Amino acid sequence: MEEYEIFHHAISDPAMVAEQIKEKQRKIIGYLCSYAPEELIYAAGFHPMRLFSSRAEIFHADNHLQSYCCSLVRGVLEESLAGKFDFLYGAVFPHTCDSIQRLSDIWRLNTGYEFFADVVMPVKLNTKSSHDYMAMVLEKFKKDLEKAVGRDITDRDLNDSILKFNKIRAYLKKLYDLRSDNPGIINGSDMHAIVKGSMIMDRDEVLELLAVITAKLETCDTAAVQSASSSPRIVITGSLCDSPDIYKIIEQAGGVVVGDDLCTGQRWFDGQVPFVDDPIQALTLRYVQRIVCPAKHSSNNARGENIVKLAKEKRADGVIFMLLKFCDPHAFDYPCLKEFLDRAKIKNILLEMDDQALGSGQLATRLETFIHMMG
């Protein structure tokens, strides 16, 4: 499908996308975490763009970060110090894991972008005080953006932005549901390109493309793509997955990915922002009600119950933990999630990944064995 190629082309060259955005007179603010308030950034007239590493050799970043920081943090700092993010007007850092918090300080002191913001959200999300604090943090970030842009962000600006991002989330959810119902309808690398592209491309273009893709898939001849319907069904969980190759490896091993719990996947677009009188309160509600990551807390069992619920909803035969090397929050999270899955008798496997070095041969062997166990 030609629409897929637009997404693939975009994620292969984010700098090209950035130039197109700047031609439309929108300055770009980068972010690394799914807790970044994109709606506020967009409402201020900026373009929110998720930052990824190109997996280039690390030189500059090693002067500032220990080698045991994850490859995402080291890779993004490397890109910035090497001048590959010169298209940025600035960046926002929601405080989640320790590495991103430390990256925030290093970025502020060693880069020369015009805009910088820390968004220090609460860790505990299940109390009235945490809701109030979250709203105060978002209000402060709104003021930071207003100062940068030189005008007020009106409720109408923010409501229009919320509506746009809600539509994007709804389309992505629909695509995930269509793929879960009929896994052969779209392959994993194409779905990966669509989600990743939706994080970096012009959001008006994204909306138009998602509408076309959804309409085509809803009316396609499903009889022609039934071959994957009997394949073992896989759910992926972890922090992020920035490698389309993993989907190809899973499919070549005989499995199909029917859902995920990733901050570069379903966890990013999970949940709609409700429409209430105060749009800041609306954003707050989504952040405290959405699926939490290990860097946030809503209850002791929330993460374990969610992965079991997701696996059952997607009729998954197994769950793959994609553990980014040196990602402490997810490493600490893994034993609890495994216990919940084992108790539910859902097969699972842990794969440690590193964006700088993806050993596809050994990975393929392990995945083939795991998927064969479910066949």
Image: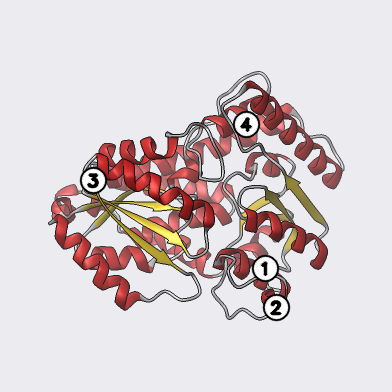
Name which residue lies at 69% across and 51% down: 93
Q: Tell which of 130 and 158 is nearer to you.
A: 130
In the image, taking residue 84 as reference, residue 288 lies left or right, namely left
First-in-chain label (2 vs 1): 2
In the image, taking residue 62 as reference, residue 218 lies left or right, namely left
Above or below 59: residue 259: above
SS of the residue at dot 4?
Answer: helix
Indicate the amino acid at tag 4.
Leu
Closest to the camera, between mark 1 and mark 3, is 3
Residue under numbered circle 3: 346
Indicate the amino acid at tag 2.
His
Residue under numbered circle 4: 283
Above or below 372: residue 357: below
Residue under numbered circle 1: 77
First-in-chain label (4 vs 1): 1
SS of the residue at dot 1?
Answer: helix
Indicate the amino acid at tag 3.
Ile
Assess whether mark 3 and mark 2 are in contact (beta carbons under 8 angstroms): no
Query: Neighbour class for label 2 at 10 Å: few (<14), some, many (≥20)?
Result: some
Query: Neighbour class for label 3 at 10 Å: few (<14), some, many (≥20)?
Result: some
Q: Position of residue 146 (x, y in %)?
A: 82, 40
Whether residue 279 is visible to the viewer of this picture, yes or no, is no
